[in-house]
Amino acid sequence: MAAELNAAPADDRLHFYDVALHSRLLVGTALYPSPAILAEALSASGAEVVTVSLRREAGGGRAGESFWGLIRAQNLRVLPNTAGCRTVKEAVATAQMARELFATPWIKLEVIGEEDTLQPDVFGLVEAAKILCAEGFEVFPYMTEDLVVAEKLLDAGCRVLMPWGSPIGSGRGLNNLFGLRALRAHFPGVPLVIDAGLGAPSQAAQAFELGYDAVLLNTAIARAGDPVAMARAFKAACEAGRGAFLAQTIEPRDMAAPSTPVLGKAFT
Amino acid sequence: MRIRVIGAGAAGLTAAFELLRVARAQNRDLALEIVEKSAKPGLGCSYFAGGMIAPWCEAESTEPIVARLGAEALEFWTQIVPVAQRRGSLVVARPRDRSELLQFSRRTSHFVTLDRPALAELEPDLAGNFETALYFAEEAHLAPRDAMAELVRLLAVEPNVVFRCGVDAADLPDNVDWTLDCRGFAARPDLAGLRGVKGEMMVLRSADIRLSRPVRMLHPRHPVYIVPRPDGTFMVGATMIENEERARVTARSLVELVNSAFALHPAFAEAEVVETGSDVRPSFADNLPRLLRKGRRLYLNGLYRHGFLLSPALASRAARVVFDDAYFPEVMDETERQRRAS
């Protein structure tokens, strides 16, 4: 029965490269009031993957070690990122440092192209992705919802794509539903992660209802009035959205469809 | 009683001052020795502090205890050691960041919202650039270097106080009854979980701008504050970076600070850069302060970015621990802290 197939979240795994995960919520580690609240929020979110920025924290060398140590102590899978990088060279160098620091081939690749929207420089992104994939990295590219860019990133060797919902930290949710639907439809077999722009749990649920495989967020939890409670709320929303997708939501229709037959009104 | 205070920054100097005050009030015999490894007092991270005594603004991003303890600093710095000016503080945001202002107002108290005419009356130079502002009238600000110099002056005239600068306390014999360890980040080998959070600042001089009180400008990624100083300069600060580099100011940080100052008032573009500075803030994982007692040694540490705001409250409690064997769960009890935080 369909219900049995779908209502079994324990078997519903997310695959990033060759890693299988239960949680579909990926969480950032910046902007929290304190590392202690960060640790509590991570635990409440149920996340198995955290993303950590390195570019600025590294300073002139490895000066961020204290904070990175706190992240490692969470015993979660670390997805280092290249946030703050604006050139291919910078992003590649940061990725190489990340691999060494966290002993992982994973890298969330960000090449920022524009200061106001922090939108990715997709040309630099594809170029950096080619270099990193060739060096054996498992690249998670932060991209716009552009189909052609997606195609080129897959050609470069990426096996996960991370389109934005809306600009980083804006909390505006999914700005371009049409584009995000098209991306999902074009690449049915590729794990797609909404990265950036989510503000409310309902927006995370919406991403899953569209068929997205996971969401990554930071500001929405870190800068909430109560980050720990918000982490819990996002966890529930992700489970609800994913559950709804697997359960197959009904198609909307224009006219009412009475849930019980209306007797005695034969001609209405 | 012989007491040694190690570290002559905001924490050590206020602690020494409070020890002296409590000893006097209780008619106790006290010989106080203040040991500082630098050649002069006040050259640690306190040297680069903003000096805002702004407990209610800080409530935006800290736990309630910071505002509660910080409120004690208002009396200390305006009446007991009167170096602060109580002219309130302002919070503004550029039109594009107005949601930040809304969020800030929801999480704080003790302010009124100003419209443009009211802002123009209070701070004429800002009214051209901002439609609205939050005004925290009861807050204060001080010049950290002047404040520390005043504490040194007040302490140095006391016959039972000795300053020993350029001395490493580790080289001194253990011949005191109590040690108050106020070394900040330097105490890390003794304190598990103490980390440094880097902050960078700059000082600008402009004759074209007049400000009478600190102004915070909100921004989703790099909020800044500008504090007017008595000598016609403005302190612009401060970055918050999770690393432990002490003296290394990056170009990017300067760009952010300058951009923000420029956005606050275009005349800052022609200001003279008087100084740039950088150090790390001693912080525990919850970014909350601690008094940690180990026998007859009391650590006063973890003041994070609230050195001048929290020193008085911590110092007065430290004095009570030493003289009265008092216990303050809110800063001494790990379990209590964890329970409250959860």
Image (cartoon, rainbow, N blue to C red):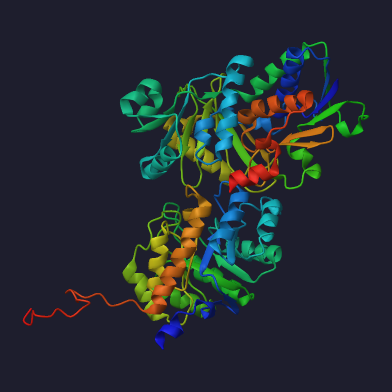
What percent of the width, then of the height, locates residue A8?
A: 49, 80
Q: Quadrant of residue A181?
A: bottom left
Q: Is residue A119 above or below residue B189?
A: below
Q: Is residue A64 above or below residue A213?
A: above
The residue most toward the left is: A267
Q: Is residue A163 visible?
A: no
Q: Is residue B283 above or below residue A176?
A: above
Nearest to the observer: residue A147 or residue B110 = B110
The residue most toward the bottom is: A1
Residue under the point 47% across and 50% down: A224
> For the N terminus of chain B, which image quadrant?
top right
Residue under the point 61% across and 55% down: A39
Q: Is residue B245 left or right of residue A24?
A: right
Q: Is residue B334 above or below residue B309?
A: below
Q: Is residue A12 left or right of residue A64?
A: left
Q: Is residue B235 visible?
A: yes
Q: Is residue B333 left or right of residue B113?
A: right
Nearest to the observer: residue B91 or residue A114 = B91
What percent of the width, then of the height, locates residue B244?
A: 70, 46
Residue under the point 12% across and 80% down: A263
Q: How many marks?
A: 0
What percent of the width, then of the height, locates residue A170?
A: 41, 54
What percent of the width, then of the height, locates residue A172?
A: 37, 57
